[in-house]
Image (cartoon, coloured by chain):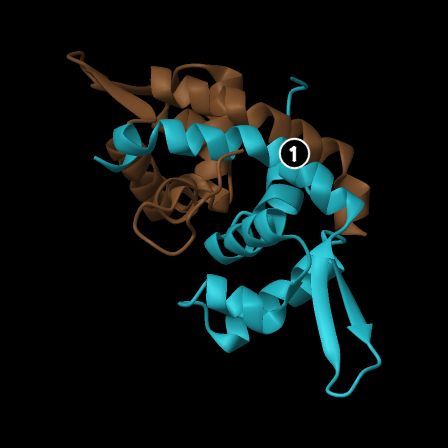
Chain colours: A cyan, B brown
Amino acid sequence: MQELDLKFPTCPVRNVLARFSDKWSLLVLVCILQNGKMRYTEIRRSIPDISQKMLSSTLKHLEEDNLLVREAYAEIPPRVEYSLTETGESLMLAMRMLLDWSLQHFQEVTQ
Amino acid sequence: MQELDLKFPTCPVRNVLARFSDKWSLLVLVCILQNGKMRYTEIRRSIPDISQKMLSSTLKHLEEDNLLVREAYAEIPPRVEYSLTETGESLMLAMRMLLDWSLQHFQEVTQ
């Protein structure tokens, strides 16, 4: 693995990883990975303890970071759905090993 | 990938990933991955903007989570070094894809 420069603005941990490695971003990304296209209310049902404000801001910044796409359908009532972009899908592929690791080492880390 | 239950205390995102996915934990883990055994002052020099209090609490919880080991040598002055445990090393292997992904998608996510 290439040596990472942890100090400067080119650090991938500070500038990329830290943008989506908070608990709520991870939960929203995994939720949409597992369920495919989802509506706002469906996501809230899957993550019942996330506040409306936190879910809205999390969806917004994941969209701005090009990891999620928001599709609005001109219907009455209006329908809005969120899904992973290609970049988001490639992120979740890279994340898969970490998710599997977390399952395998659940006891060791949480005891 | 096994379907993850995101709601309950068995959720690996909430109970495992979220314990070390904050910026400071990630920076400390990558720093020790890249440099091997390190002293407290050496880590602080590699991550100059981390406060003393934050570094101490980050090292403490990574040790409690069985990801780092702290070795104290009975010398004068006392010498203390931190390194990855076996569990920590296996985590960083699983993290490697994500770090590479962050380097490759730096522009896309940060533009």
Residue B10: percent from left, percent from top: 32, 45
Above or below — where is B73 with respect to B11?
A: above
Instruction: Report the front residue among A47 and A7.
Output: A47
- Left or right, B9 with reference to A44: left
> Callout 1 environment at 10 Å: few (<14), some (14 to 19), or many (20+)?
some
- Left or right, B54 with reference to B24: left
- Left or right, A20 with reference to B31: right
Image quadrant for the C terminus of chain A?
Answer: top left
Residue A27: percent from left, percent from top: 50, 53
Q: Which residue is mark 1?
A: A93
Camera sees residue A56: no
Q: Quadrant of residue A7?
A: top right
Name the subunit of mark 1.
Answer: A
Residue B94: percent from left, percent from top: 52, 24
Residue drawn at 30 percent across, 43 percent down: B57
Q: Quadrant of residue A108?
A: top left
Image quadrant for the N terminus of chain A?
Answer: top right
Residue drawn at 38 percent across, 56 percent down: B7
Residue A80: percent from left, percent from top: 72, 73
**Residue at far right of view:** A74
Instruction: Report the front residue among B67 and A9.
Output: B67
